[in-house]
Image: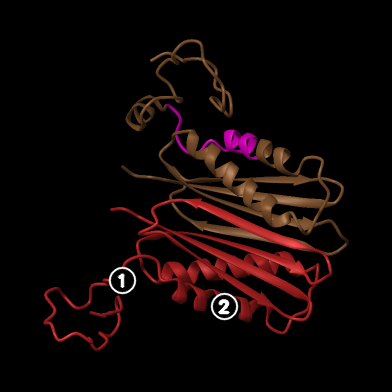
Chain colours: A red, B brown
Amino acid sequence: MSLIVAFNSEVYQATSQQRLSYPAYYNIKVGFNADEAHNIVKECIDGVLGGEDYNQNNINQWTASIVEQSLTHLVKLGKAYKYIVTCAVVQRSAYGFHTASSCFWDTTSDGTCTVRWENRTMNCIVNVFAIAIVL
Amino acid sequence: MGAGPPRRALRGRGARRAVAPPLGRVGATMEEYHRHCDEVGFNADEAHNIVKECIDGVLGGEDYNQNNINQWTASIVEQSLTHLVKLGKAYKYIVTCAVVQRSAYGFHTASSCFWDTTSDGTCTVRWENRTMNCIVNVFAIAIVL
């Protein structure tokens, strides 16, 4: 059965023939929705860095804006998650840049999402880590 | 509840003890850790020392090498995470590591967190040598039992 309903939003058409036995407005997607977070973060980056070239004077303000706007939009989803958003911006060059991350958490409820963005003068990597709040 | 033996970072890493350790942070169960834990929040200094030793162990004396860099970053995060978990505290951990070759080009990072400020915490370790810069972030989220 493939049934997806959205929290606080319209109820999408169920593909199953079974009658719903619970209120249809409950969010029954288990785990972290990485696609949704990906879209949110990508829009934030486009809004801040789109059309800009690397500028040392503005870069602090840009990175701060990216993480703050992404975090605000993620929190607005209203899910019971704690969020950690990290952003790294590197000027495009022939020099190497590597990142790695490792997490010790509950794999069924927690999740991560990484967004890579680039333009002519810079590379941007944003990581989102979501930890479920157990009520 | 006495003060107990002085705390050291990386206690018990490969060490053999002649006598059984007193009831403390090493060798005890999770419930015993929780009962005797007298500090509130995340101990950033302890995490800082742990991570710094891991980086020194992996990158110390090395120059930037594109063939090895993947292995190095993976080693740093995995070893740091292993040692943090061995502390036995009721925390979930996220460890991120970024290694950049030293150059005249800019490199900026930022992070923002939405969590419980009383119990969760973070620690950032910056390390550098002649050929590379390394930044490791540790985020610790308390597990509410």
User: The numbered mark 2 sits on a residue in which chain?
Assistant: A
Label 2 amino acid? Lys
Badge number at residue A29: 1
Q: Circle 2: is it few (<14), some (14-19), or many (20+) Cα within 10 Å?
A: some
Residue A117 in percent (x, y) is at 65, 76
Residue at 80% x, 68% y is A57
Badge number at residue A42: 2
Q: Quadrant of residue B106?
A: bottom right
Residue A74 in percent (x, y) is at 46, 69
**In the drawing, does residue A86 fall left or right of residue B85?**
right
The magenta segment: B38-51
Question: Vertically, is B127 above or below A20?
Answer: above
Query: B104 and A65: which one is in front?
Result: B104
Total residue callouts:
2
- On the same chain, marks 1 and 2? The answer is yes
Query: A84 and A64: which one is in front?
Result: A84
Residue at 53% x, 70% y is A70
Label 1 amino acid? Lys
Residue at 58% x, 23% y is B8
Residue A97 in percent (x, y) is at 74, 62
